[in-house]
Image (cartoon, grey):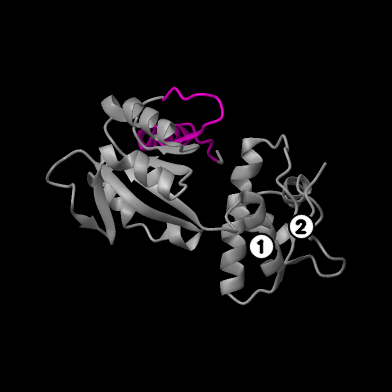
Amino acid sequence: MSASPDKNEEPVDLQVPKAVVSRLSLYLRELQHLVRDGHETTSSSQLGSLLGFSDAQVRKDLAYFGHFGHPGIGYRSAELISAIRRILGTDRDWPVVIVGTGNLGRALLGYKGFSHQGFRIVAAFDVDPAKVGTTIEGVSVLHLNELTDVVQQNQIKLGLIAVPAATAQIVSDRLVAAGVEGIVNFAPVTLVLPPGVSLVGVDLAIELEQLSFSVVNRTTGG
């Protein structure tokens, strides 16, 4: 069963591979670039070429969710952007909280890309008395003890963790208890979460390890 791009339907329970969802985000970014450059239409070949995928891969990924092309035209860029944002759930405003306002937390608070994609950090939390009560990038830093009230009052479902590894599990437990259903963890530790809570781990050291592996094991033309 697939979701139609032309109807306002309830979310459909699709068994979609994570790799496909990741590529949807890449398609969305490229489509946004194409629109900014004045391209009203595109094709699976063009999208694939820009990202290093085959046109068949692009069509297969999009086919999980419906039919989006037009005979003789290809894809209407703005229309496909709207469809992908609806699929990803970013066609609405997502209030987000962040716990931890150290160097990484401050950098995340200053990242403008979140708001461009529909994510708005509404509050930051810390336990350091020197940070609580301050404002970073226009966001108030509150004590962690206020987390539950803020999450429930604002119906927040998404949270970012930017604390040291030793306290990340405690923070995730508090986020879940407050009602957060999706967590992005930047701490270099594996978290244990209950069923029904989604987790994305971003360990920058691991990403560099993967990159170094690719460089060391690259096959040269010789």
Q: Which mark is residue 82?
A: 1
Residue 38 % position (x, y): 62, 77
- 193 vs 90: above or below: above
Residue 171 % position (x, y): 33, 31
Q: Earlier in the sequence, mark 1 or mark 2?
A: 2
Label 2: few (<14), some or many (≥20) within 10 Å? some
Report the magenta residues as a range. Answer: 191-220
Tell me the kind of residue under disc 1. Ser
Name which quarter of the figure residue 15 lies in: top right
Residue 107 % position (x, y): 29, 52
Label 1: few (<14), some or many (≥20) within 10 Å? some
Residue linked to disc 2: 5
Residue at far bottom of view: 38
At a point 43% along the width and 32% down the height, the residue shown is 176
Q: Is residue 194 part of the magenta span, yes or no?
A: yes
At a point 57% along the width and 55% down the height, the residue shown is 90
- In the image, taking residue 25 as reference, residue 194 lies left or right, namely left
How far apart marks 1 and 2 lie (CA) works out to 9 Å
Name which quarter of the figure residue 129 lies in: top left
Asked if one can make out residue 82 in the rendered structure from this viewpoint, the answer is yes
Q: Say which of 38 and 164 sits in front.
A: 164
Secondary structure under tag 1 reads helix
Q: Is residue 50 part of the magenta span, yes or no?
A: no
Residue at far right of view: 71
- In the image, taking residue 143 as reference, residue 202 lies left or right, namely right
Asked if one can make out residue 52 in the rendered structure from this viewpoint, the answer is no
Residues at badges 1 and 2 in contact (C-beta under 8 Å)?
A: yes
Quadrant of the rendering where the N terminus is positioned: top right
Q: Say which of 89 and 16 sits in front.
A: 89
Residue 74 % position (x, y): 79, 65
At a point 16% along the width and 40% down the height, the residue shown is 128
